[in-house]
Image (cartoon, rainbow, N blue to C red):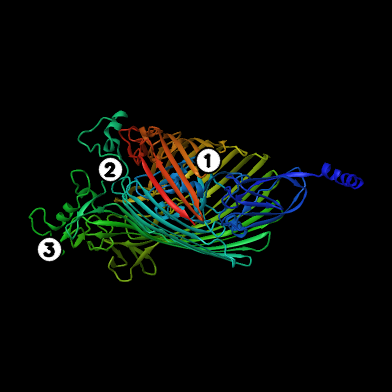
Amino acid sequence: MLRFITTLVILFPIVCFAQTSVVRGTVKDKVSEEYIPGAYVSLGTFKAISDDNGNYEFKNVPYGSYKLTVGAFDFDTLQLTVVIKSEETVINPELGGSTEIEEIRVIANISMDRKTPIAITKISAEQIAEELGSRDLPMLLNATPGVYATQTGGGDGDSRITVRGFDQRNVGVLIDGVPVNDMENGAVYWSNWFGLDAITNQVQIQRGLGATKLSMPSVGGSMNIVTNGMHNRKGFSFKQEYGTGNFLRTSLSYNSGRTKKGWGFNFSGSYKQGDGWVEGTNTQGAFYYGKIQKLIKKHLVSLSAFGAPQKHGQRSFYQPIQYWDSQTAADLGVPINQNAIIDRGIRFNQHWGYITNADGEKERKNERLNYYHKPQITLKDFWQVNKKLSISNIGYMSIGRGGGTRLANSAGTLYTQDGHVDWDAIVQANRVDQLFGGPNVDLAYSPTELKSTQVQIASVNNHFWLGYLGQFQYELNTKWSVSGGIDYRYYKGSHYQEITDLLGGDYYVNTSNFNDPNPMKRKGDKIALNTYNNDRDGLVQWGGVFGSVEYSGNRWTAFLNLSGVVNAYKGVDYFQRKVLDLGDTVLRIGANDTINYNGNTYTASSPGLEDYATDWKTIPGGTIKGGVSYILNENSKLFANLGYLSRTPQFSNVIDNNTNTFFREIKNEIIQAVELGYSFSNKYFGVNVNGYFTNWKNKPFPYGIAIPDPNDPTASIYLNINGMDAIHYGGELDVAYNIFKNLTAEAMISLGDWTWNSSETFYVPELDYSFTFDAKGVHVGDAAQTMMNFSLRYEPIKKLYFKIQYQWFDRYYAAFNPFFLQGADARREAWKLPSYGLMNGFAGYSVNIKKVNVFFNAMVSNILNSKFMADATDSYYAPNNSDAQSASVVFGQGLRFNLTLGVNF
């Protein structure tokens, strides 16, 4: 009895006063920040499996020191020592290779939602798999605030995107930190990036000037695409897709994860073919990707290469409304012209037809065919010197080859009764003299060969791109860090036209360009149909430096970024003019010029002639931007950012392609931007709201404007007209709400007010020439200024989901050139398209069968088959009456579907 009482006295204070804790948290992927379900979590003798949202919980854990072990399928196991000393302890383990995570954060400029003071939207790999289907990547972004994307003419890969009213030439796009915007015109051609979805870990959209350290053309925003690496789940993935227009795609991917010896291998390949939703937009392409990584002590070295050789039919997409659908035109008040082409149908495409081959069989032939292959090779070394300092070096190279075809003489194109190209009739016309019925020969060129009167040509746009990006990041202490680097790019674009098909003839005589010294052309020969489609090179060099200072405290976060750039431009003319260096002077001689100098006569055939090249012209630019955010509590923050960008002009506003000379007046574009925002999020609800104001000054007239040469009325002088300003301001709201554990709602609304802000007179004293325009207060065209999105995602059982999405677009003003708002057209608004809404649906299911994951995804876009106009122009020149009758439009695509069946193992 005494022993029992003694034991009770000893144990009583332990039982009464022992302290325990509730330990809980969420397991996440360190890169994608996605929840990891099914993760194994152990804390001493306590064990749990994370739920569908990555959550775990241990109750009654005594205070003390423990080893926390977290593991998940295809992730490296994480082990930590933790100390439990409070009633409630939150531990959020993150799985993934730390060295590569740091590489992605530094090199790809990936920002953290909670701390970075900018407007960010992240698209996860899971969302891409569920919603993309067979669409181009930009179409997935229509649910993002401020983003408007369309498929233009409907060709595979011909999509375009605008952010806050700025087209994709003003949106910076990076893949693993490497910029990919065209260095001559800033464009992004999405057909070159087919297959990226198979290897994308996440896509991050930074709206506004953003926090990207590089000096970029990111007036509207920037898009960072981060590919998979050794930190991602290892294994094979195979999937087969089938969709609208007999679309077939087969994809195979492999990721080794990180091997015991520090290697990582990532390979992916894909093949596609289809007929397209729009007729005559058949597509065929392949995608290949390979990445090899190796951890060498503190270095992560990687070599990657990818490319997407493809060809696809295209459609010239601006036609009057009645051309597509007379009923829609009549509903909009357009008087129907019965003598014009009407009711071709919104899937119609005039740029294709059937041709009889050598075996007497009919086969499809495209008039407009885009073909391109742009492989890119990247070598990286990321060096984690110590816990504070990291240094990265990236070298990359891209070699693009390809172009687009069309008929040389569109006015002379022969069509069938249903409006398609009559290839057989064209071949017959090339072979038979239309007046005499005999062989179509021209004795002036050849007594026996057939002279083609119509041929197919290709506009070839090859390029060679070499770049280097070096940067460092240094953590001064736990709160302050600095970073900086250098950015160099060399680009050479070669542009010319060549004959690809003589269509039954043996040669073609180029009579449309008097400057062509050799008018007789054969297949493969270069041809210039006018003075600006000549044989030329555009060379661009880019040298930049950048530096940033960042502060990250418990509540305050701030950054300041400075960057400077020097752009160098040079043009080379191989066709239109040659130069002859005589020592005391340099003569510039056109193909048909005769120049008398010092008693001598010089022509294009004189000895010693060289290709005409400009000197290098350098133009500096720079950026200063900064931002600050304040964490109000664990759920919410405020942020603000502002910036100033002096952007160097695009090549087409520096060198006149018609004469290969520099424009007379070249100025930088100036962008001033400010943004304010607030965000709130907890386990069930999240909201982001922000407002922005962007002042875009000195937008130039594209490619210059032609005026009569006062010294030669038969010739023209091209002037660079500057001075067009625009103001873009608006507000954006997006909300996510977990209504129940298996039901999530998302909503977005974006309201913009984008207007031109200039009324100027441009005067050239030496030419006594003035140019006046007045666009003040006129709305900017080419994108919807009001956008809304609402979606519901429901999981009735684990791994089975259904999602419905509705998108609304309004206040889309037709595209036009504001420089031609003159006289009676001054301050005239462009035509406003009817608003439209689209409903999309998604569903999928996955199941684990032993160690194999089988998954199925389905996507249906435009479920209601709504008829809508997705793009319009009110003429390149001044708005012509600014109504539905004068507008040229393209209709968006109707109901489309995509089915995917695949396995992961």
Separation (CA) of disc 1 from disc 3: 64 Å
The three-letter amino acid code for the residue at tag 2 is Phe
Quadrant location of the N terminus? top right
Depth check: 628 or 765 in front? 628
The residue drawn where x is 41% and y is 51% is 190
Label whose residue precedes the other's in the sequence (2 or 1): 2
Separation (CA) of disc 2 from disc 1: 39 Å
Question: Which residue is identified by label 1?
Answer: 694
Question: Which residue is identified by label 2?
Answer: 348
- Is residue 822 found left or right of 33 in the rendered image? left
Q: Quadrant of residue 540?
A: bottom left
Residue 722 visible in the current orientation: no
Q: Position of residue 365 (x, y in %)?
A: 25, 54
- Residue 694, compared with residue 308, is above or below; it is above
Question: Are dots 3 and 2 in contact, CB under 8 Å?
Answer: no
Question: Which residue is identified by label 3?
Answer: 443
Depth check: 667 or 753 in front? 753
The three-letter amino acid code for the residue at tag 3 is Leu
Image depth: mark 3 or mark 2 in front: 2
- Is residue 74 found left or right of 505 in the rendered image? right
Image depth: mark 1 or mark 3 in front: 1
Q: Position of residue 769 (x, y in %)?
A: 38, 44
Label whose residue precedes the other's in the sequence (3 or 2): 2
Characterize the local packing of mark 1: few (<14), some (14-19) or many (20 or more) Cα atoms within 10 angstroms.
many
Q: Which element carries disc 2, helix, strand or loop?
A: loop
